[in-house]
Image: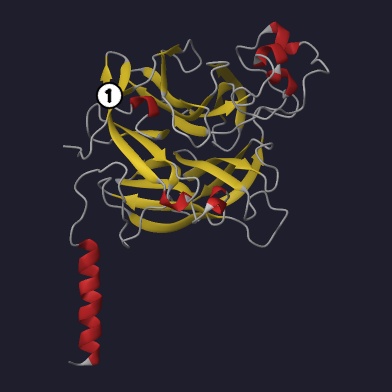
């Protein structure tokens, strides 16, 4: 057979093999391949819907424990149906040449999320950033921007939230001089603080330098106002910050909620005029029972609703940790819980847990399904 014909047939058959059976359902926890036949590499991510296309952003992992640090950057995939994803490449690359860069290779870059600003026509990415070699002490927010949903994104800055501003629900004791017994830093996890955070006044400690910001998410309300929610005060308390109109910085208005509850993996979404949170306990890479809460106002009285997961393995949230809740476009009352099943010894093998999110009254519920579809 002619060599050119043989090569053509080989290439054609390879393409057919990759695309012969497009996905028509979700199979949580299984290998999920992109258009190139590779397992999706988009961990701790979030999804943007823009002009009829979904864009999925996440941490691009490499094999082994080094995958906990950023070796490549933020990956992006696109899809029309949420089942089948096209690799759009690296949306935000780490800096490999400048050791002084905030996002130099080897930093910790987690939970990237992207929102679209209809006024500026810009796509804005926020993520949790830890500076290289500093463990989890930096606790910064970082911002990048692009003219296109898939990037490339240009890194702008990193900082701690709301330096020099008090939350709208600040208490009088927070404004008292901080005792010399309040350390500049603690170990930053559940059980690490020697006393309740308010008695230590972690909020007041960080007033001048800015509040801590770790696991995070973004939310754009119906009126176009954007909010950044994140674990703060040594992970003991959540804070929600209103962003400026350009979505690139803080407005100085923020709210403390679910204080002393130690939550990570926080998500924020809206349904029927109510605001919801789904998050996890602080147990590192190990899964735990999820938590949920509801409020009539984003800067309001948040009521905890308990673990939304139901059934076998619900106390481990089906071995996953929340990262995003997606409202599906064009389908009434259709929400998807999106979680990560972390594998810290080999991060690149992390799996994705997508499950339908239903409601019993005001309470969100997540039931396990081996396979399911939007139909």
The image shows residue 198, relative to residue 185, as above or below, that is: above
The image shows residue 66, relative to residue 289, as above or below, that is: below
Q: Which quarter of the rendering shows the N terminus?
A: bottom left
Q: Position of residue 114 (x, y in %)?
A: 46, 42
Q: Residue sitting at 20 percent across and 38 percent down?
A: 372
Mark 1 falls on what kind of element? loop
Q: Give the residue furthest to the right.
A: 180
Q: Where is residue 134 in the image (x, y as percent from the top left)?
A: 70, 43
Q: Residue sitting at 36 percent across and 55 percent down?
A: 39
The answer to whether residue 323 shows anywhere in this view is no
In the displayed structure image, the side of residue 173 where residue 316 appears, left or right: left
Q: Give the residue furthest to the top.
A: 172
The image shows residue 365, relative to residue 76, as above or below, that is: above
Q: Mark 1 points at which residue?
A: 311
Q: In which quarter of the image is residue 178?
A: top right
The image shows residue 261, relative to residue 3, as above or below, that is: above
Relative to the observer, which residue lies in front, 127 or 187? 187
């Amino acid at each position: 057979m002619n060599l050119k014909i043989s090569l053509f047939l080989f290439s054609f058959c390879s393409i057919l093999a990759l695309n012969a059976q497009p996905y028509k359902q979700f199979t949580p926890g299984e290998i999920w391949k992109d258009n190139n036949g590779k397992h999706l590499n988009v961990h701790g991510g979030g999804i943007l819907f823009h002009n009829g296309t979904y864009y999925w952003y996440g941490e691009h992992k490499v094999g082994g424990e080094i995958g906990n640090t950023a070796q490549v950057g933020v990956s992006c995939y696109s899809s029309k149906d949420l089942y089948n994803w096209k690799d759009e490449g690296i949306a935000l690359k780490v800096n490999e040449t400048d050791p002084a860069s905030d996002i130099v290779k080897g930093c910790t870059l987690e939970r990237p999320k992207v929102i679209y600003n209809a006024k500026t026509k810009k796509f804005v990415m926020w993520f949790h950033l830890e500076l290289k070699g500093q463990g989890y002490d930096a606790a910064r927010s970082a911002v990048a921007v692009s003219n296109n949903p898939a990037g490339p994104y240009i890194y702008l800055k990193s900082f701690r939230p709301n330096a020099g501003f008090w939350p709208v629900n600040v208490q009088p004791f927070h404004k008292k001089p901080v005792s010399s017994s309040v350390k500049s830093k603690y170990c930053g996890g559940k059980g690490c603080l020697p006393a309740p955070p308010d008695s230590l006044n972690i909020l007041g400690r960080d007033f001048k330098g800015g509040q801590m910001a770790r696991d995070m998410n973004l939310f754009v309300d119906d009126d176009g106002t954007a909010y950044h929610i994140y674990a703060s005060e040594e992970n003991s308390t959540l804070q929600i910050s209103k962003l400026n109109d350009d979505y690139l910085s803080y407005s100085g208005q923020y709210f403390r909620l679910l204080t002393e509850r130690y939550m990570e993996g926080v998500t924020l979404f809206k349904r029927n005029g109510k605001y919801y949170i789904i998050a996890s306990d602080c147990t590192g890479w190990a899964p735990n029972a999820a938590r949920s809460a509801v409020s009539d106002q984003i800067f309001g009285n948040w009521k905890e609703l308990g673990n939304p997961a139901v059934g076998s393995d619900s106390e481990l949230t089906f071995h996953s940790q929340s990262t995003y809740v997606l409202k599906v476009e064009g389908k009434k009352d259709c929400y998807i819980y999106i979680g990560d099943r972390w594998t810290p010894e080999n991060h690149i093998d992390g799996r994705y847990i997508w499950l339908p999110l239903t409601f019993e009254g005001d309470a969100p519920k997540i039931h396990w399904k081996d396979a399911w579809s939007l139909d």
